[in-house]
C-alpha cells in the first residue's frame, strides 16, 4: 500500500468516527458535514427513512434528541479504494438508554458507505445502515442512527 492510499484510508476512518461522534453528541451540523449535499441515506432497517441528507438528518435529530445516551462503536472497517472513490463496510455496536426505559438497549449491524474525495476532504455520498440485531425495546425509538 502506498503512502497516498494509507493516508486516504486514515482520513476515511476519521470520517466514520466523526459520524459516530456527531450522533452521540447530537451535533447535527457535524453530522450533515460527513455527507455531500446530494447524499442518499437509508435507515429502512430500523423503520426509518430513505432519502436526502437533509431529510434524514432532520429525522435523526427528531428521533435522537430525546434519547439520553447513545454510544456508537465502529469497528472491522474495510475500505476499498479506487482513486477518488471508495466503498466501506464497517460494523457498529450501539448501546443506548431510551427515555422511560430502565437499563440499556443495544443494537448492532453494518454500515455501508460510498465515499468520494472532495475539496473539503472525504465525504459520504451514500449510507445504508443495516441493523442486524437489537436487544430490549428499541421499537420505542423507531430509528436510531
Image (tube, rainbow, N blue to C red):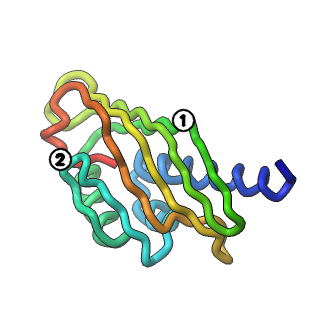
Find residue 31 and report its horizontal and vertical position in percent. Answer: 45, 60
Between 121 and 85, the one lying in front of the other is: 85
Q: Is 86 above or below relative to 95?
A: below
Determine the residue positioned at 44% across, 37% down.
92
Q: Mark 2 vs mark 1: give the one in front.
A: 1
Q: In the image, 109: left or right of 141?
A: right
- Between discs 2 and 1, the one toward the N terminus: 1
Determine the residue positioned at 14% across, 39% down.
139
Q: Is 2 above or below relative to 109?
A: below
Find residue 68 and report its horizontal and vertical position in percent. Answer: 29, 39
Determine the residue positioned at 19% across, 35% down.
138
Find residue 13 and report its horizontal and vertical position in percent. Answer: 63, 48
- The circle drawn on residue 75 is 1
Find residue 27 and report its horizontal and vertical position in percent. Answer: 43, 57
Q: In the image, 76: left or right of 127?
A: right
Q: Verify CB contact (< 8 Å) between mark 2 and mark 1.
A: no
Image quadrant in which you'd find residue 50: bottom left
Q: Secondary structure at mark 1?
A: strand
Q: Cα distance, mark 2 to mark 1?
A: 24 Å
- The circle drawn on residue 39 is none
Image quadrant in which you'd find residue 98: top left
Image quadrant in which you'd find residue 5: bottom right
Determine the residue positioned at 29% across, 58% down.
61
Mark 2, residue position: 142
Q: Residues within 10 Å of mark 2 (few under 14, many from 20)?
A: few
Q: Secondary structure at mark 2?
A: loop
Between 120 and 61, the one lying in front of the other is: 120
The residue lying furthest to the right in this view is 3
Q: Residues within 10 Å of mark 1 (few under 14, many from 20)?
A: some
Q: In the image, 94: left or right of 90?
A: left
Amino acid at each position: 500500500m502506498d503512502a497516498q492510499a494509507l493516508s486516504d484510508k486514515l482520513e476515511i476512518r476519521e470520517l466514520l468516527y466523526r459520524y459516530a461522534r456527531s450522533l452521540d453528541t447530537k451535533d447535527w451540523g457535524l453530522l450533515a458535514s460527513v455527507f455531500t449535499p446530494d447524499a442518499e441515506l437509508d435507515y429502512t432497517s430500523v423503520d426509518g427513512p430513505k432519502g436526502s441528507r437533509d431529510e434524514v438528518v432532520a429525522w435523526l435529530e427528531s428521533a435522537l434528541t430525546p434519547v439520553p445516551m447513545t454510544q456508537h462503536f465502529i469497528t472491522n472497517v474495510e475500505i476499498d479504494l479506487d482513486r477518488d472513490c471508495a466503498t466501506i463496510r464497517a460494523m457498529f455496536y450501539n448501546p443506548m438508554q431510551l427515555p422511560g426505559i430502565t437499563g440499556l438497549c443495544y443494537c448492532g449491524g453494518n454500515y455501508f458507505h460510498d465515499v468520494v474525495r472532495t475539496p473539503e476532504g472525504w465525504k459520504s455520498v451514500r449510507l445504508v445502515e443495516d441493523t442486524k440485531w437489537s436487544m430490549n425495546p428499541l421499537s420505542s425509538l423507531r430509528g436510531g442512527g
